[in-house]
Image (spheres, rainbow, N blue to C red):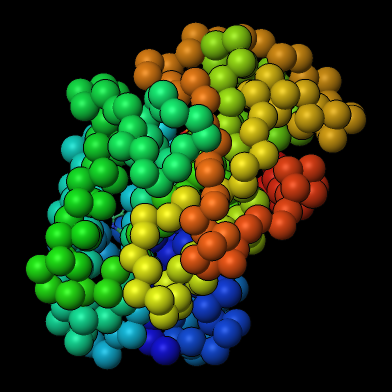
Amino acid sequence: MKILVTGGAGFIGSHLCKRLVDEGNEVICVDNFYTGRKKNIEKLLESDKFSVMEHDIINPLEITGLDRIYNLACPASPPAYQKDPVFTWKTSVIGVMNMLDLARKNNNCRVLQTSTSEVYGDPLEHPQKESYWGNVNPIGIRSCYDEGKRASETLIVDYFRKFDLPVRIIRIFNTYGSNMDPNDGRVVSNFIVQALSNQDITIYGDGSQTRSFQYVDDLIDGMLKMMENNLGFIGPVNIGNPGEFTIKELAEIVLKMILESKSKIVFKDIPKDDPKIRKPDITLAKEKLSWEPLISLEKGLVQTIAYFRSEVE
Ligand code: NAD
Ligand code: UDP
């Protein structure tokens, strides 16, 4: 198939591009390199099945002959999406609309949108099921991302209703793995890089807030299963690992796994609107896609620490 991956030079996008090329597809990566890195896709460029187009999806795009569009373009780390909130909003809404219009021009090809667990905001229901409408501050510092992704879901389902566009929506929960930018600012990369370079491990708040961490290979499996499901199942569907950890537990696990580290844990102010708990209910993904994550946190961290070791060195 001829497949477009927007945000293909980012953390998740580069893994997806590799998998799709390995499976024999022709892959076009579209990225404006806002947070993406050329080094994530350097090796892929050796394949004649892979090409890159530097482009901002806020602007319309013309490509023909597409069979699939995976839309991953959007900064995902809080410091990155808050740096230019208007850009984040435009990417999430105007960018998504451009990709939906592109799909329509390509004979109504399938489009998968990478939505997020952030649509549940600071959840009052735990674990979070897809039927939960969320608890989101519409005017906070996280809103450009949370509300942007919520608006994108609305738009996508409206294109499905109005134009019969075959859409797919996944809600991704905190994912980690190789190809993350060491300076990305998210918790897994921060803690590992801090531990490897003997800097303080920065816990925001008292570390009692929880997250459920998914290894990137599990996510890619779920993403492909969702795109290729022929049940007409459009989602949204949670794709995440239900293993739930406090942030303090995560810091302790990382320190236990990097034995040589001289880092100490320090506590810093918690950012505004930081969700207190988060854990996916994945019953729907199991039922519809026969998908569930297979890689434990400790196993995924072994791979991820090895990757950051080479980055830090
Ligand atoms: P990332 O920041 O590593 O990758 C995003 C990529 O999109 C980068 O290459 C960036 O340069 C590109 N990009 C951003 N805005 C663009 C624009 N307007 N035009 C073209 N390219 C643009 O983030 P990631 O973790 O790989 O996330 C990928 C997608 O998955 C995002 O849409 C994110 O919202 C979603 N997601 C990720 C997670 C996670 O835990 N990593 C969780 C939920 C949702
Ligand atoms: N966090 C932390 N120290 C860091 C980075 C993040 O304690 O150096 C916390 C953050 O406040 C949040 C959790 O870790 O409670 C997950 O943060 P991340 O930015 O990775 O993802 P998100 O908040 O979007 O789930």
Camera-side residue of 100 and 86: 100
292 to the left or right of 89 = right
Q: In this view of the protein, which residue sits in the foreground, 107 or 279?
A: 279
Residue under the point 25% across and 37% down: 147
Q: Residue at x 73, y 54 (%)?
A: 295
Query: Residue 64 vs residue 198: left or right?
Result: left
Quarter of the rendering containing residue 313: top right
Place of residue 157 in the rendered image (x, y in percent of width and height, measured from the top left): 21, 59
Q: Position of residue 265 (x, y in %)?
A: 71, 14
Height in image: 5 above or below 116? below
Percent across and percent down for residue 41 are 52, 67
Q: Say whether residue 87 is visible.
A: no
- Residue at image position (65%, 56%) is 293
Q: How many marks?
A: 0
**Residue extending furthest toward the left:** 162
Residue 217: which quarter of the image? Answer: bottom right
Against 17, residue 222 (above or below) is above
Residue located 65% across and 24% down the image: 246
Q: Quadrant of the N terminus?
A: bottom left
Occupied quadrant, residue 77 = top left
Q: Is residue 15 left or right of residue 54?
A: right
User: Quick one: 176 or 305, which is closer to the camera?
Assistant: 176
Mark yes or no: residue 106 visible. yes
Q: Residue 117 at x, y = what percent? A: 43, 41
- With respect to residue 242, does 13 lie above or below? below
